Image (spheres, rainbow, N blue to C red):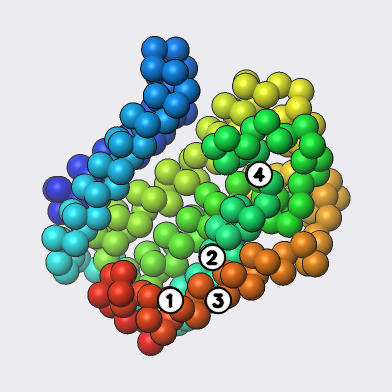
Amino acid sequence: MTNLVVAAVVWVISHLGISSTKLRPALVARLGEWGYICIYSLIAVAAFAYLIWSYSCLGVSEYLWNPTLVLRWVALLLMPIALIFVVGSLVTANPTIVGQSGKLAGIGSGSGMIRITRHPFQWGVVMWAAAHVLAKGDVGSLVFFGAFGSVSLLGTVLMDRKKSAQLGADWTSFSNVTSNIPFAAIIKGRNRFCLDELWLPISIGLSAYALLLWWGHKFISGVAIL
């Protein structure tokens, strides 16, 4: 368990402690933008590998709650939504994605999943992490999946601050018609829900979910869902 906790801390610090602090501009000034991205990517991959290895070596840990059939069904229903959010972040112009900040001026109020949240990838990871924690119920899973979920959840707030400082008025205009919390801007009337703009992420997300249900999850983790 000690290895897993250390790995989780390393994962959190390697993300939030570098990309969202004053260390990032200092490294960019010294290494250049792409030099920073390369170094940061190597650190992230190493931290990811350490976290995966630590969790795979853990075995059975103490249960915090009984992983009931109800919780399993909650996880099964939450996962397709998580996948749709993740896919939606990749198939829509999104200024929070690396390299797409220059598209901000032409994005307006966004489209597709961006109307729901300006951080669909991060919220997809949060839902993925929550689903697995609920379904498993043990300490090890809480630490492992919680590390991913906490980085993504806190990352939405820190990313907003960073983008606001970098992009100024353009980001302010964009953030005024979108929201961090899913559906908040739509509920408040600052944006609108357009189902016809979501057919691609829904189609790909549900297809990916079906693949995971029947084969992919066992291939990746060694544990079958069905």
Q: Which residue is mark 2?
A: 83
Q: What is the spatial separation of the Cα atoms under label 4 and label 1, in whole angstroms?
A: 26 Å
**CB atoms at circles 1 and 2 under 8 Å apart?**
yes
- Looking at the image, is mark 3 or mark 1 earlier in the sequence? 3
Q: How many marks?
A: 4
> Image quadrant of residue 156?
top right
Q: What is the spatial separation of the Cα atoms under label 3 and label 1, in whole angstroms?
A: 9 Å
Q: Which residue is mark 1?
A: 212
Determine the secondary structure under disc 3. Answer: helix
- Identify the image quadrant of the C terminus: bottom left
**CB atoms at circles 2 and 3 under 8 Å apart?**
no
- Looking at the image, is mark 4 or mark 3 earlier in the sequence? 4
Determine the secondary structure under disc 4. Answer: loop
Task: Give percent across and percent down for residue 56.
Answer: 19, 62
Q: What is the spatial separation of the Cα atoms under label 4 and label 2, in whole angstroms?
A: 17 Å
Task: Give percent across and percent down for residue 77.
Answer: 53, 76
Q: Nearer the viewer, mark 2 or mark 3?
A: 3
Q: Which residue is mark 3?
A: 207
**CB atoms at circles 3 and 1 under 8 Å apart?**
no
Q: Nearer the viewer, mark 4 or mark 2?
A: 4
- Looking at the image, is mark 4 or mark 1 earlier in the sequence? 4
Q: Which residue is mark 4?
A: 94
- Residue 21 at least partly seen: no
Residue shown at the point (14%, 60%) measured from the top left: 57
Q: What is the spatial separation of the Cα atoms under label 4 and label 3, in whole angstroms?
A: 22 Å
